[in-house]
Image (cartoon, rainbow, N blue to C red):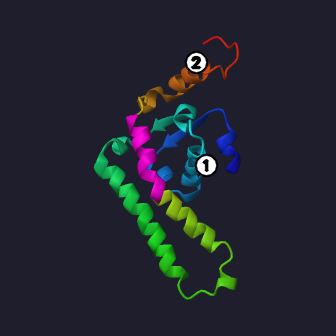
Amino acid sequence: MQSISNMDYTVLLISDSYLKSANCMYEVLEVMRDRNYRDKIFPAVIDSGIYSPITRAKYVKHWQGEFRELENELKGINMQNMGKLNEDLKRRQDISSNIAEFLDVVSDMNNPNIEDVCVRIEEKLGQEGFLGNRNM
């Protein structure tokens, strides 16, 4: 996952499950480390609810809740018994701090209808020169 920020281009399938997955959102955080990440992502929006500010706010609340729930569960656990739980807590904090910006960027982009995603991905990759000399 940490090497995802080194990729030339990343196709993201944006769905409710994707936006609620800690692993998927960790990948998003890795992509966002690149200052020019907006130019390196192709979000294929499956759940068009993200175009609504109310829905975007619900995802922020979801991740704030995930952070608080884990934080509460960690209370009373001795530090030597934590394993990687502190890293999981920090990751949830990072996600809750950045998901609004990510959703704003994705919702502002000109995303295709899901029926046209394969065609649009191929077009975009061709424009960016990632498909070589393939005829389109």
| Dominant secondary structure, magenta | helix
Please indicate, yes or no, whether residue 20 appears anywhere in the rendered image. no
Residue at label 1? 30
* Amino acid under disc 1: Glu
Please indicate, yes or no, whether residue 6 appears anywhere in the rendered image. yes
Name the residue: 70% across, 17% down.
132
Rendered image: mark on residue 115: none
Marks 2 and 1 in Cβ contact (< 8 Å): no
Rendered image: mark on residue 127: 2
From the viewer's side, name the closer residue of 132 and 93: 93
Q: Left or right of 13: which side holds 110? A: left
Name the residue: 56% across, 69% down.
89
Q: Is residue 122 above or below residue 72?
A: above
Could you tell me residue 53's position as x and y percent?
30, 47
* Mark 2 secondary-structure assignment: helix
Q: Which one is closest to the eye, mark 2 or mark 1?
A: 1
Could you tell me residue 110's position as x and y percent?
41, 29
Q: Which residues are magenta?
A: 97-108
